[in-house]
Amino acid sequence: MPTLDINIAEHISIPVPSKVTVDLDPAKLEFGKTFSPNWFVAEYHDGFWQNARVEGLQNIALHPAAIVFHYGQSIFEGMKAYRWANGKVALFRPEENARRFARSAVRMAMPPVDPAFFVEAVKALVHTDAAWTPAEPGSLYLRPTMMGTEACIGVRASHEFLFFVLALPSGAYFKESGSGGAGSVVVYVAETSSRAAVGGTGDVKASANYAISLHTIEDGKKQGCSQVLFLDSNGKRQVEELGGMNVFFVEGNTLRTPNLHGTILPGITRDSVIQVSRDLGYAVEEVPVNIDEAAGKIAAGKITEVFACGTAAVISGIRELQFETGRKLIIGNNSVGPITQQLNARLQGIQFGRLEDTHGWMQIVD
Ligand code: PLP
Ligand code: COI
């Protein structure tokens, strides 16, 4: 399918900036439940993206045979706008989300949205609902989404799509890890189910990847765990990633994270953590990580910190691994470690405009 680009400025009608009607105290915002009053939306039919607009957020009416309902043709992104102390609102590396969204679309037989159009769409919404961006440590979480909307029970790619962006004022992703600092959580190690297989869709943000991990996430919650760590589907016990985050292991001054091998998501936070870690003088290795070897090193006190990272969670320490077999493994001193905290402070410092943005990652939305 062709990549379509249109000059968004000519097509977007932007409503009057909205007045804030909810308490934006980050401590009171449950992640994923509070929406700003507008959304960006465009429809694809007859081979073009049409009718791009920012308008009041509303329910959508779809035919019950819409392909997304039956065959799950759907992708999404997660990104954030941050309120700086000077009142400005800035996006973090939006082109990276745009490129990944286009890759996800191609993988799922959808028309890729031109990356420049994607960024303009996000900026148009952030501009309209900028007042809904909470102060630090909160942020405005953005959820670009695309789905196949054509009514057709035949198993094939849709010819009609909806592309929309939602904005959610947000506090900490993990309530249990508190807001602001890196926090620390207990993670369930899935040993009998996996999230992605070679040749599958693990390296893109297909909604299907999340659907198939929900039952394991619920199992983990029953054991008191906040997230699930998935291993490779071949039973070789290689660490992949968490349900919504990448993972790092800290041994001395070296950070290790699973290499990108087609079944894990190339996280933008993962890439940023690698760059920030090197800036701070740490060695970073992108290599296969075997869970049993890592567990041995944790038990021996050689691996002292493990942390997860992603847009929603930022950087979150992992203080304990709970294996499906029942084994529990405390990491380091059972709380967030100093390197995890240092990396979180550096990354958040850049995102909130407090530290120099040496990589040119931030984009102020006028
Ligand atoms: N892995 C998965 C499965 C995710 O859902 C996410 C979140 O988007 C990540 C990793 C981290 O990616 P990013 O840092 O781009 O948000
Ligand atoms: C994100 O971090 O943006 C994600 O999409 C992951 C999800 C756990 C919210």
Image (cartoon, rainbow, N blue to C red):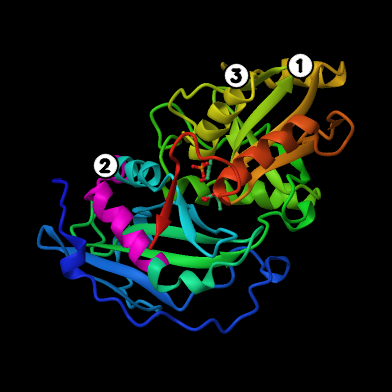
Q: The residue under label 3 is which amino acid type?
A: Val
Q: Give the amino acid type for the residue marked by disc 2 in the picture.
A: Val
| SS assignment at label 2 | helix
Q: Which residue is mark 3?
A: 284
Residue 252 circle label: 1
* Kind of element beneath mark 3: strand
Which is more foreground, mark 3 or mark 2? 3
Image-quadrant location for residue 137: bottom right
Prevailing secondary structure of the magenta residues: helix
Instruction: For mark 1, give the secondary structure.
Output: loop
Give the residues drawn in magenta, as a range.
105-126
Relative to 214, does residue 59 appear above or below in the rendering?
below
Total numbered badges shown on the rendered structure:
3
Does residue 198 appear anywhere in the picture? yes
Pointer 2: what residue? Answer: 106
User: Who is closer to the viewer here, 117 or 199?
Assistant: 117
9 magenta-colored? no
Amino acid type of the residue tagged 1 in the rendering: Gly
Closer to us: mark 1 or mark 2? 1
Alpha carbon distance from label 3 to label 2: 31 Å
